[in-house]
Image: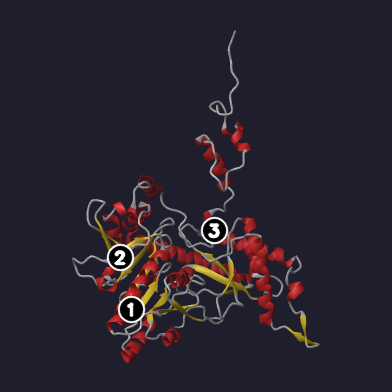
Amino acid sequence: MVLSKTASNSDVSVHSTFASRYVRTALPRFKMPDDSIPKEAAWQIINDELMLDGNPRLNLASFVTTWMEPECDKLIMASINKNYVDMDEYPNRCVNMIANLFHAPLGEAETAVGVGTVGSSEAIMLAGLAFKRRWQNKMKAAGKPHDKPNIVTGANVQVCWEKFARYFEVELKEVKLSEGYYVMNPAKAVEMVDENTICVAAILGSTLNGEFEDVKLLNDLLVEKNKQTGWGTPIHVDAASGGFIAPFLYPELEWDFTLPLVKSINVSGHKYGLVYAGIGWCIWRSKLDLPEELIFHINYLGADQPTFTLNFSKGSSQVIAQYYQLIRLGFEGYKNIMENCQENARVLKEGLVKTGRFNIVSKEQGVPLVAFSLKDSSRHTEFEISDFLRRFGWIVPAYTMPPDAQHVTVLRVVIREDFSRTLAERLVGDIVKVLEELDQIPARVTCKLAASEESSEGKLVKKTAIEVQREITTAWKKFVQNKKKTSGVC
């Protein structure tokens, strides 16, 4: 007689994953499960859920790199288990290469001052702390109050600047925007500077429309004010997006350490530095610009090692990837890639202009992206276009500008290395299809809001165009948020 036994629930060796009980069980969300499951089942369940995510390469909201060469992918996997704090050489090589790219005034044998970070947010925190400490030391030495520091920026800054101000108790003084001028006005910024200003932050590549702020003009105006006041207010350049663009596309542009008041620069390696998410850099002009008391020295990893980061342990694979890109591409390779991005942005912009339906908000000089808005939004809005494009797989954000241009709504397409001309032409075609579809349906929100009249003390008062636009924008923002669609700025 042949003996056999019935497989128990735990005996899954003869089952495929989809024949097992694990695909009938809901994935734990808030509490660790009591029992283990086979590795194949865990992989399959999580992999299946990840399929619901959007295609990263079609996410045109993000500046973050989504493709690298297979050889670099291999290096990343080979170093995935290495700790950043155990590495000294590769971060230093990257810091020196980037510092030289930004024209840091270094002697022949002088080492650059800088640090690798998780991204530009951490880099900005570190730069801001250095400015705050230098200002405090200066005020203490002069016997003056040092408890109310402030920083001057444009209202177009990324949210990390607001985080820095709130976390480290620094007043954030923002230069308001205006319609048609969506970056910081240098003259207005300098007017807001006072004795308690730790620095003025200029953006090389605005998140909103990719535009470069005029760092040269800001430097010149601030030099004059410093002569008059003796305050010595410095500049920080937030080059998160533009730091790996300007040196290759606009080599004559004056924005970096060639300007005397620029004391520190941050740049995102995971944006146009062409590395996957998780790497940024902060570079200081000289050792004098980074107070020594902020640097910690440790020796319990085998040798004396200086450290100035908010986080201690982190993966080293992104540092390896950055070093790979720097030596693999060189100046020539980066220049070719940035020129390709710029050309594909031009193709997309020309395609949008040909529709006759859009105003281009982005500028010729800046990050290779296209920001655009509807010429006529009385019937349908940019939020509707963003929502409808998702049906084709595209993630194109729609958002409102900061004060005082919050009535302006914009769509934005970031052109990354892996966004080809074919994709640009396909996107234009899909946008045209969306416009044709929207033209065939009644306006959803406008019917209720646009051109309606309000009763004010018994009189009928017609709403202004801006009031109508703001109501439509607010309604669509709520609509998109309720559907839990991503429409933020990355």
Here the colouring is secondary structure
Question: Rounded to the nearest whole Å, what is the CA distance between mark 1 and mark 2?
Answer: 20 Å
How many numbered tags mark residues here? Answer: 3
What residue appears at the point 34 percent right and 48 percent down from the top-left corner?
Answer: 82
Image location (x, y in percent) of residue 245:
40, 67
- Amino acid at circle 2: Gly
Quadrant of the drawing holding the N terminus: top right
**Frontmost residue, 86 versus 17:** 86
Q: Give the structural element (helix, strand or loop) at label 3.
A: loop
Image location (x, y in percent) of residue 304:
22, 57
Which mark sits nearer the N-terminus, 2 or 3?
A: 3
Question: Rounded to the nearest whole Å, what is the CA distance between mark 3 and mark 1?
Answer: 41 Å
Horizontal side of residue 187 vs 348, given as left or right: left
Q: Dot 2, crowdedness within 10 Å: few (<14), some or many (≥20)?
A: many
Horizontal side of residue 459 vs 244, given as left or right: right
Q: Dot 1, crowdedness within 10 Å: few (<14), some or many (≥20)?
A: many
**Frontmost residue, 441 versus 295:** 295
Image location (x, y in percent) of residue 189:
44, 84
Q: Which residue is mark 1?
A: 135
Which mark sits nearer the N-terminus, 3 or 1?
A: 3
Q: Give the structural element (helix, strand or loop) at label 1.
A: helix
- Please determine whether, in this image, residue 456 is positioned above or below residue 89: below
Q: Give the structural element (helix, strand or loop) at label 2.
A: strand
Q: Which residue is mark 2?
A: 114
- Amino acid at circle 3: Asn
Image location (x, y in percent) of residue 464:
70, 84
- Amino acid at circle 1: Trp
Q: Residue 225 appears in which quarter of the rendering?
A: bottom left
Q: Which residue is mark 3?
A: 59
Q: Residue 349 appears in which quarter of the rendering?
A: bottom right
